[in-house]
Structure formats: C-alpha cells, structure tokens
Amino acid sequence: PPSLQVKNKAPAEVQITAEQLLREAKERELELLPPPPQQKITDVEELNDYKLRKRKTFEDNIRKNRTVISNWIKYAQWEESLKEIQRARSIYERALDVDYRNVTLWLKYAEMEMKNRQVNHARNIWDRAITTLPRVNQFWYKYTYMEEMLGNVAGSRQVFERWMEWQPEEQAWHSYINFELRYKEVDRARTIYETLLVIVHPDVKNWIKYARFEEKHSYFAHARKVYERAVEFFGEEHMDEHLYVAFAKFEENQKEFERVRVIYKYALDRIPKQEAQNLFKNYTIFEKKFGDRRGIEDIIVSKRRFQYEEEVKANPHNYDAWFDYLRLVESDADAETVREVYERAIANVPPIQEKRHWKRYIYLWINYALYEELEAKASKRTRQVYQACIELIPHKKFTFAKIWLLYAQFEIRQKNLPLARRALGTSIGKCPKNKLFKGYIELELQLREFDRCRKLYEKFLEFAPENCTSWIKFAELETILGDIDRARAIYELAIGQPRLDMPEVLWKSYIDFEIEQEEYEKVRNLYRRLLQQTQHVKVWISFAQFELSAGREESLSRCRQIYEEANKAMRNCDEKEERVMLLESWKNFEEEFGTDTTKERIDKLMPEKIKKRRKLQAEDGSDAGWEEYYDYIFPEDTANQPNLKLLAMAKLWKKQQQESEAAEMDPDKDIDESQS
C-alpha cells in the first residue's frame, strides 16, 4: 500500500553496523534457551519409566537409520553408564551385524570390556577383530598391549607371532623387537631382525638398525658381519651412500681407521657423484679428524675424479674434459690406471672424418705417447701408441704432420735411425705435406746427410713447385756447400716457374745472392728481367739503391739514370702515390749527392697536392654523399696544364670575392682610412 512505501531514501544520520547488531544481541542473550529443568528420580518405578523412554528414543533412532554407527555407540554407552553390561554387549553385537568393518565399533566394544575388567570377553573381541580385519594394525597394537599390561608375556608374544605371519609394515616388526628387548630377549630380537631383512623388508635403513642393535648390545663382530652382509646383498647395482656412511662410522667408533678409508674409497669409486654428496662430506670430516695432508688431498682428487667421470659419461666426445681428467690421474694415480683412462679416451674416435673434428682428439694420442715415453719409460709401448695412431688416421682424406714428426723424433731418441727414416718416407709417400718435407729435410740437415737433403728438396719441389721458400732454402743449401753454379741454376729454375706464392721474395733472394757473389752485371741483368715482368716502384728504387751502393765512380750517374728511366716509365701509371714515392726517393738522393742544378730540376718535378671531392655510391646504387681525397698534379703532365691555369684563376676570383664582401660589411672602416 502507498502508506508503507519509503518516501525518503537518503541514508540515516546514525548508521548501525552488523557488528553493533551482533554485540547487542550478545549482551541481551536473545538466542540462549533456558536450561531444561533438572529431573530428579525418586523411586524405582520412575527410573524404569525413564529407562523405557530413553530406550524407545534410541531404538527409534536406530530404526530410522541403521547404518549410522554413532547412534549404536551412544546407545551402548548409555547402557554401560547404567551398568547394564549385558544389554550394552547385545547392542554392540547387533551393531556388528550391521557393519562389522567399522573399526571404531570394535575398539569401543573392546574398551568397554576392558574398562569393566572383563578380560576374557575383551580377548574374545580382539580375537574376532584381528581375524575379521587382520590389516588394521590398531587392533594388533591394542591386543598386544593389553596382554603385556596383564603380564601375559607369552600371550602377547603369541599375538605378535600371529601378526607377523601377515607380514605387516616395518613399524610392527620394530614394535615386536622392542617388546622382546623389554624382556632382555636379545636372541629372539635377532631372529626377528633376520626374518624382517631376509623375507619382508630388506631396506637399507633396516640393515643399519640391525647393525646398530648388535653394536648397542656390544656384539661388535656381529655388527660388522651385518654391514658386510648388507654390502654383499645390495651389490654394486643398488649401492646406497647411507649404508656406507653408517658402516664407516661404526668402524670409526671401533678405531679401525684404515678400514674406514677402504670403505669410503670403495663406495666413492662406485657410487655416482650426484648420489654421494653425504659420503664425500663424511669422508672429508673423517680425514680432517684422523687423516694427514695426503689423505685430505686424496679426498679432493676423488671428488674431482667423480666430476670428470660424470662429464665424460654425459659426453664421451668432450675431449677437454678428458684432458682435465687425464691431467688429474697422471698427477696421482699408478701407471695402469692412467693407461686405462687413456685407452678409454682414445676409444672415442670422432664420428666424422673431417680434420676440424680431429684436431683436439689427436692430442690425446700425443699426450699418451709422451706419457709412455717420459713418465712410464716404456719405449716399446710408446712405439705401439704412435703406430696405432698412424693406422687410425684416414691419410687419404687428411693427416697430421706433427704425429709423423714426433714419431720420427722418438725413434731418433731411441737411436733407431732407419725406423725414423722409414716413417718419414712413408709419410711423404702416403700424404705429402709441406711440414713433413721441411721436418724430414731438417732431420737430414742435422745428420749432415746433404745428398739426402738434395733428393728431398727435389721431391719437395716436384710436389709444390710454387713454394718460393723451398726454392730459396734449396739454393741457400747449395750456397753453403759452395756449389754456386747449382745454386744459380736452382734460382733460374725457380723464377721460371709459371706460378709462385711469393715471387718478390724469390727475386730479392736471387738478387741478394748475386750481390754476395759480386756479380754486378748479373744483378743488373736480373733487375732488367724483373722490370720486364713488373714496373713496381719498389723495384726501381731498389735498382737505384743498388747502383748507388756498387761503389764505383759512375755509380751516381747510373743511379740518376735509373731514376730518370723510372720517372719516364711511371708517367702513364695510374697509381700516383707510387710515382710520388719514386720522386721523393730521387729527391732524397739528390739532396745527399746532387748539385744545385739537379736539386732545382727535381724540385720542378715534384707534384702539387690538392684536395678534391667525389661522389659516393652505396652498394644498392643509392647516393651515399661526398668524400674528400687528395690528388697530385705533376708539372710534367702537359695535359693537366690548362686545368692548373683554370684552378689558379678560380683561386684569384675567390680571393677577390672575399675582399669585396669584407669591404661591404665594414664601410666605416674605409671612411676612417680615407680621412686619415
């Protein structure tokens, strides 16, 4: 109706919170119901009437829902409170018919019997419970505890035996063992441990508990035997660090320090690194307490060895890890161990036959051979290592000259020259390389076998005729031996080759050779022949300096004549810097040895250096801006004279422009100057 509608919907001035409402309700105790009046029963008839009403209520509740066990338990407990034990039993039995799997029901039933000192009834209930639900450990625990509290040790033991036939979890076995130990039955406890370990739960922690049990009762030999059996039982496949730590601590308590070391080392050699952190830690503490410096170093070495083992297992072709591992093993282990690690390392041959994959691998063989020779002093094994390595390398695809040379040098150290020569001869036959030829020639030179050197140089130059260094060395050898004609013939053959890697070095060496022989005409002839092939400025300068150093009267005029020729020859040269270099060299010569006339002449030939700009283009053809560069204008180049004149006129015009602009900017200054 309209009269009940709220007209003013604005919030009230005084706001009431929910907290205030609750507090007010609490203060007024609005929700509390008054307690029911106390009922006093005064006679038997009234009591029976009360019992009848309560039983009817309980029975109605049960009839409504038989499966709610709490109703049965409340009913039974009410009957128990009235000392109606027989009625309570009846209720529990009826409840068990409804749900015999309910653990609480059995427990309440048995507790009622025990509370009322009905021992045989309680035994009967526990027997029924463990027969019906043998996997419920609570029944077994309470049954054995009841028998033990009654002093029926034999009965309690019998219950434990029945329980153990079901092979329960470990805690049940340990409860049985503790029960026997409470009555000093050590032999019985040992038998239980044997059954537990052999048949049911052979875990590491149970072996350790068994051993500590023996140790606690001062059966030290038995304890050691238990640990040894445990180690044998688990073998190397299922090793656990906790077992070895416990074993080592036991031996430490027995002051058997050497046995402790053996246990730790045995375990560390066989357990993977990531699973042996605790083992390392305990071993380190032990060595710090009882060991010497050597023992502590052994621990560190063992730890690092584990790390390297894990690395090479993860990636067998990680040769750097093998090198580090081998360095560690060589510093500490015996020869057989080192050899074993080397053999494992070299077994990891690179899967791809490309030299770049073999470059690290080959050093494993080299280090192996050097170890056998220098450390193990086993020359026979060293030879076998070198030969095995040489057989392994695919020489048709690539080779390693250093292996052949190291093998040859080893044989020479063993005073076995024929084998060294045979190895090097095989190498240049199978896979000729510059380094192999050089090494073989070097060896024969040291042995002063010059005829062999000549043959080797001939083979070398047949193999690599473009190698200028080899030609030069061959000629130098003949020069040292005093056979000048042979040396000259070698040089002639060399410069006649169609392709050379460093022709300028070869020509220089030939010229220097002829200068040493003071064959100046031949030197001039060589320079002329060289200038037919190249007009390089350095050749002209070198030719001029040679003429100057010839030391004869006409040397200055010859030198000047060379510079004249060079200047004429280089007029058409595109490289202006080279021409400038020649003129500067000529100028230096004239300043030292020339007259005023020649100096004046060379000054006139010197170019003028000017700055120019040119347009740049990017790779894609777009405009990339401008760059400045220096150019040279030679007076001799008549074609450039008009340009020079034009340039001079442009400079003069620019200067005049600047002066006129300055005059316009400052007219007062001109008036002052005119008045003065």
Image: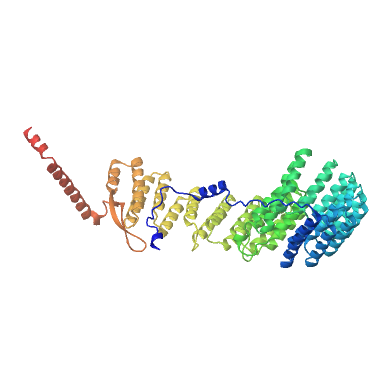
Q: Residue furthest left?
A: 675
Spot occupied by residue 12 in the image (x, y as percentages of width and height): 41, 50
Left or right relative to 550: residue 110:
right
Give the number of callouts: 0
Query: Residue at the location (13% across, 45% down)?
Result: 660
Q: Quadrant of the N terminus?
A: bottom left
Whether residue 91 is situated above or below residue 331 in the rendered picture = below
In the rendered view of the protein, which quadrant contains the C terminus? top left
405 or 331, nearer to the observer = 331
Is residue 369 visible in this depiction of the protein?
A: no
Q: Residue furthest top?
A: 676
| Frontmost residue, 212 versus 405 | 212
Classify residue 82 by image quadrant: bottom right
Specify how the rendered protein is coloured.
rainbow
Give coordinates of residue 372: x percent, y percent: 74, 51
Is 34 left or right of 511, judged from the image as shown? right
- The answer to whether residue 327 is left or right of residue 518 is right
- The quarter of the displayed image where residue 87 is located: bottom right
| Nearest the eye: 585 or 178 | 178
Q: For residue 618, what is the image quadrant?
A: bottom left
Q: Position of residue 359 (x, y in %)?
A: 62, 57
Residue 476 seen in the figure: yes
- In the image, what residue occupies the spot 72% across and 45% down? 300
> In this orientation, which residue lies closer to the viewer: 461 or 296?
296
Q: Position of residue 89 (x, y in %)?
A: 83, 60
